Amino acid sequence: MVYEQIVQGGLTTKANPGKATILALGKVFPHQLVMQEFLVDGYFKNTNCDDLELKQKLTRLCKTTTVKTRYVVMSDEILKKYPELAIEGLPTVKQRLDICNDAVTRMAIDASRACIKKWGRPVSDITHLVYVSSSEARLPGGDLYLAGGLGLSPETQRVMLYFAGCSGGVAGLRVAKDIAENNPGSRVLLATSETTIIGFKPPSADRPYDLVGVALFGDGAGAMIVGTDPTPVTESPLFELHTAIQNFLPNTEKTIDGRLTEEGISFKLSRELPQIIEDNIEGFCHMLIGNAGLTDKDYNKMFWAVHPGGPAILNRMEKRFDLLPDKLNASRRALMDFGNASSNTIVYVLEYMIEECRKMKAGSENCDWGLILAFGPGITFEGILARNLAM
């Protein structure tokens, strides 16, 4: 596995006593790098499809996603071993889960190790584990295999969030915040891990919406350490998590519709999703920032760490809040470099957010307060009002 480290040095703003903070971030990717410009030919070759109309549609979608590179677990070796994955209509859920269960565990272990290394304290100091994935299904769950792979104490308290989709990373962070603040001295490891193999299918005119996923989604894993009252010298908090809320929109459960079938997971994403988010996000954010006495006039003074579900969602967010062009840079960079990696993506956004905030602070711009946002099945809104502690 390959992972990148972020710079965490420099001055650190002091955290408020008892408030949860993100103490470290880590990420990892499978070795298979996909360049967007070569994706269409490779995908149609691997699935033995010669439908010119579908190929042209996927080519157009690839240009509109703004994605440049992604990492995936799928490889020539896997397709040679499991050629049935590229054949329409065959029951392949067992094969997919065999691949996915192993892949997400390995990526989650590696991302967690990268995060723990940057945190700087021993793995034995981890007291709680929150594990998030929409790419596996088994009993016991991936949380147990992750705990065993890391050598966590059998006394480590575990929470598992399955099939939360794109909002899973921020949902996991909300849960980690609650655990940390209600268990003084605890250190919570949050790990997310996803692969698109669970839903990989050949192109079909009967499922044109599948092509959106082919053009947009990527694989990988992310991790965070969350805790209150950082230890001086040994811990450098990155963000303070002030307030976390979750809302669902009634009667929108079919907008993001996913089902586990004999052929893997089948997803349907409604075209109305960006519009529904735009119509409801303002009230959600207004409620969130009100907890710190902030108002709508402060939006352009804040940082925005938004899960990049796709460029249409980011564009509508920018328009709705009349945001300055650089406010969503971290989200757009994560989408361009890694695609939409479901629950993992918020980790990549937060890493880029630290870089963007340092640029803003160097230019005397204020980005002390900000929002961490994601949208998932339900439609579910997850939001955290945060304070930037990394200088």
Image (cartoon, rainbow, N blue to C red):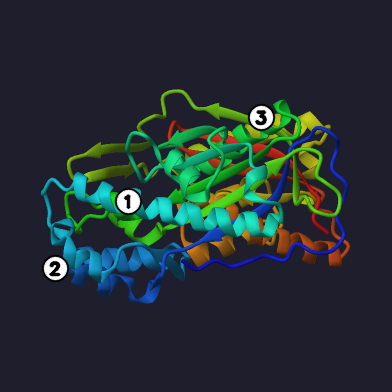
Looking at the image, residue 93 lies above or below residue 286: below
Secondary structure category for the residue under label 2: loop
Secondary structure category for the residue under label 1: helix
Q: Label 1: which residue? A: 100
The residue depicted at 55 percent of the width and 43 percent of the height is: 152
Q: Nearer the viewer, residue 55 or 87?
A: 87
Is 16 placed left or right of 247 in the picture?
right
Q: Nearer the viewer, residue 173 or 249?
A: 173
Alpha carbon distance from label 1 to label 3: 29 Å
Looking at the image, residue 46 lies above or below residue 302: below
Q: Quick check: can you spot residue 199?
A: no
Q: Label 2: which residue? A: 48
**Marks 2 and 1: in contact by CB < 8 Å?**
no
* Quadrant of the rendered image containing residue 349: bottom right
The residue depicted at 19 percent of the width and 72 percent of the height is: 45
Q: Label 3: which residue? A: 178
Is 52 placed left or right of 56 in the picture?
left
**Marks 3 and 1: in contact by CB < 8 Å?**
no
Of labels 1 and 3, earlier in sequence is: 1
Alpha carbon distance from label 1 to label 2: 23 Å
Q: Bin the neighbour count of mark 2 within 10 Å (Cα to Cα): few under 14, some 14-19, many 20 and up.
A: few
What kind of residue is marked 1?
Answer: Cys
Is 236 placed left or right of 372 in the picture?
right
The residue depicted at 17 percent of the width and 60 percent of the height is: 82
**Marks 3 and 2: in contact by CB < 8 Å?**
no
What kind of residue is marked 3?
Answer: Asp
The residue depicted at 45 percent of the width and 37 percent of the height is: 164
Looking at the image, residue 210 lies above or below residue 9: above
Looking at the image, residue 345 lies above or below residue 134: below
Q: Bin the neighbour count of mark 3 within 10 Å (Cα to Cα): few under 14, some 14-19, many 20 and up.
A: some
Q: Please state the horizontal and vertical placement of residue 229, each as a whole percent of the image.
A: 81, 39
